């Protein structure tokens, strides 16, 4: 069951983006941020 606030529903209609698409975009941003962090802070450490 999906629990959407009225503001989420309105935002989805205005911008044409579904909650699923927002979730997928957020996941992509999290992975990119983790990779950037590793690149900046973990160079030289074994995996």
Image (cartoon, rainbow, N blue to C red):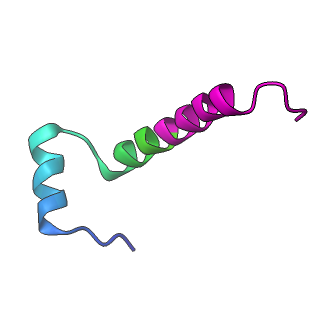
Image quadrant holding the N terminus, namely bottom left
- Residue 22 in which image quadrant: top left
- Dominant SS of magenta comes to helix
Q: Residue at x 84, y 25 (%)?
A: 44
Q: Seen in the image, is 11 located left or right of residue 20?
A: left
- State whether residue 8 is above or below residue 21: below
Give, as a single range, the part of the protein colored magenta.
Answer: 28-47
Residue 9 in percent (x, y) is at 16, 58
Q: Residue furthest right?
A: 46
Residue 31 in percent (x, y) is at 58, 37
Q: Residue at x 50, y 36 (%)?
A: 28
Q: Is residue 46 magenta?
A: yes
Residue 36 in percent (x, y) is at 58, 29
Q: Nearer the viewer, residue 24 or 26?
A: 26
- State whether residue 28 is above or below residue 5: above
- State whether residue 32 is above or below residue 14: above
- Residue 5 in which image quadrant: bottom left
Q: Residue at x 25, y 41 (%)?
A: 17
Residue 27 in percent (x, y) is at 50, 43
Q: Residue at x 9, y 43 (%)?
A: 14
Number of numbered discs: 0
């Amino acid at each position: 069951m999906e629990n959407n606030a009225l503001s989420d529903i309105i935002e989805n209609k205005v911008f044409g983006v579904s909650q699923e698409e927002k979730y997928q975009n957020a996941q992509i941003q999290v992975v990119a941020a983790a990779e950037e962090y590793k690149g900046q802070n973990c160079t030289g450490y074994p995996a």
